[in-house]
Image: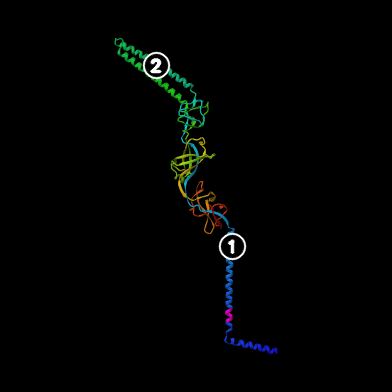
Amino acid sequence: MNYESGIQSDTAEAAVVAPEEEFGMEKPARHTKRWIIGAILVLAAIIAAYLYLTAGAEEDVADRDSQAATVTVVSPGRTTVAGEIVATGVLAARREMPVGVVGEGGRVVTIPVEAGDWVRQGQVLAVIDRSVQSQQAQSAAAQIQVAQADANLAQSNLDRSLQLVERGFVSKADVDRLTATRDAAAARVRVAQASLRELQARNARLNIVAPAAGLILSRSVEVGATVSAGSGPLFLIARGGEIEMLAQVGEEQLAQLSAGVSAEVTPVGTDKSFTGQVWQIAPTIDRQNRQGTARIALPYAPGLRPGGFATATILSGTTTAPILPESAVLSDDEGSFVYVIDGENKARRTSVEAGNVTSEGVIIESGITGSEKIVLRAGGFLTEGETVNPRALEN
C-alpha cells in the first residue's frame, strides 16, 4: 500500500510538472525574480552605507565644532580720528647765551648769582679784582688835571699877549705862537680825558654781566678763580627762559608736519604735560637713522629742565582708518599682525602696519579694510589655519 501510494504521488507530481517543463516556462521566471531581489538588496545596502557615512561625517563635524576654540571677533570698520605723531627727544633752551670774559680778565672776587636764578639785562654775574685798574684810572684823572692846568696857563698867556699887541709890545708872530700853545694844551686835555674814559670802559668790562634777561642754566666759575678771554663760557643763560623740545621724527612722519601745529610734551618721570607749538621743521634728514628734528617751543615752567628726556604727541591733521583694541594687534620678529577669521572659520594671519595708539585703540594704517572678522583676544594662542568657533563681540 505504501509503496503504491508513493508511486502514485510521484506520478501525479510528475504529471503536474511535466506540462510546464514541456513548454520551457519555469526556469526564466525564477531567475528574474532572484535578480530583482538581489538588486533591491544591493540598493538597500548602498543607501544604508551612505546614511551611515553621512551620519558619521556629521558627527565628525559636530565633534570638531565642539572641540574648536571659541574666540571673540570684531569688525572695526573705519573711523575718522585726529592724526597724532608720537616722538621722543630732549629738552633744551630755545636760545642759549654763553657768557664769558670780554675784558682782560683777572681774579674773580664776587659771584652774586647761582644756577636757576632769573637775571635781568645788564645784571652783574661776577666781579673781577680791579685794584690795579683803579690806580690806573686815578692816574689818568690826574693827567687830565695837569693837562687842564697847562691849557689854562696857555689861555692866560694868549689873552695877555692880545692886550699888548695893540701897543706894539708883542708881535703878531708871538700871538700866533701863544695861540698854538693854547690849542696844543687843550688837545692834551682831551687826550687825557679820552684815556680816562678808555680805562673806565676797560674796568667796566671786568664785570661779567648778563647780555639779556633770562634763566641761568649753568655756572662754571668759583670765587678766587683766575679767568681770561680764553677761559670759555662761565655762565649759560636761556634767553627769556624759553625752552624747546628737539623731537626726533621719522622721515615719512616729518613730511606730515608743519610749523604752527600744537603738541603736548610730557617729560620723563612725570605725568604732567605741557602745551607747546612746533616752530621749526628741520630742513635735513639724518643719513644714519633717517630722522629729522621738529623743534617744539615751550614757555618756561619749573618742570621743564634742559637736558631732560621727553615724549611729544604732535597733531598732524585727521585720518580715516580701522581702530583695533591693543589686545587684537600682535607682533613678532616679522612685524605686527592680526588673525582674520575666513569663511571656513579658520584663523588666517594678516600682516598690518600699526600706527599711533589713541585712547580708542591702535590705528591700523594698512593691511586690513575694517570689514574683516578679527580675533579680539587670545590671538597669541592661535595657529595659522586653525579652525575656531567665532563669536561676535556684544556691545
Q: How far across and down, in percent of the image, does residue 273 sit?
A: 51, 40
Relative to 372, is 173 above or below?
A: above
Q: Earlier in the sequence, mark 1 or mark 2?
A: 1
Q: Quadrant of the N terminus?
A: bottom right
| Residue 279 as seen in the image, left or right of residue 177 | right
Viewer can see residue 386: no
Which x, y percent locates residue 251?
46, 45
Q: Amino acid at mark 1?
A: Asp
Q: Measuring 45% from the left and 20% from the top, which residue is drawn there?
A: 137
| Residue type at numbered disc 2 | Gln
CA gap, disc 1 to disc 2? 125 Å
- Residue sitting at x 59%, y 59%: 66
Question: Foreground: 89 or 53?
Answer: 53
Q: Position of residue 355 (x, y in %)?
A: 49, 48
Q: Quick one: SS at disc 1?
A: helix
Total label count? 2
Residue tagged 2: 148
**Nearer the viewer's eye, disc 1 or disc 2?**
1
Q: In the visual, does 255 lie left or right of 56?
A: left
Indicate whether 356 appears above or below 221.
Answer: below
User: Does 314 appear in magenta?
Assistant: no
**What is the x, y in percent for residue 188?**
38, 18
Seen in the picture, residue 2 relative to 342 is either above or below; the reply is below
Residue at x 58% of width, y 73% of height: 42
Q: Provide the major secondary structure of the magenta segment.
A: helix
Asked whether, in this view, residue 8 is left or right of residue 82, the answer is right
Magenta span: 29-33
The residue carrying pointer 1 sits among few (fewer than 14), some (14 to 19) or many (20 or more) residues within 10 Å by Cα, namely: few
Task: Tell me, yes or no, whether the highlighted magenta stretch contains residue 30.
Answer: yes
Q: Residue at the front extreme?
A: 395
Q: Which label is found at residue 60?
A: 1
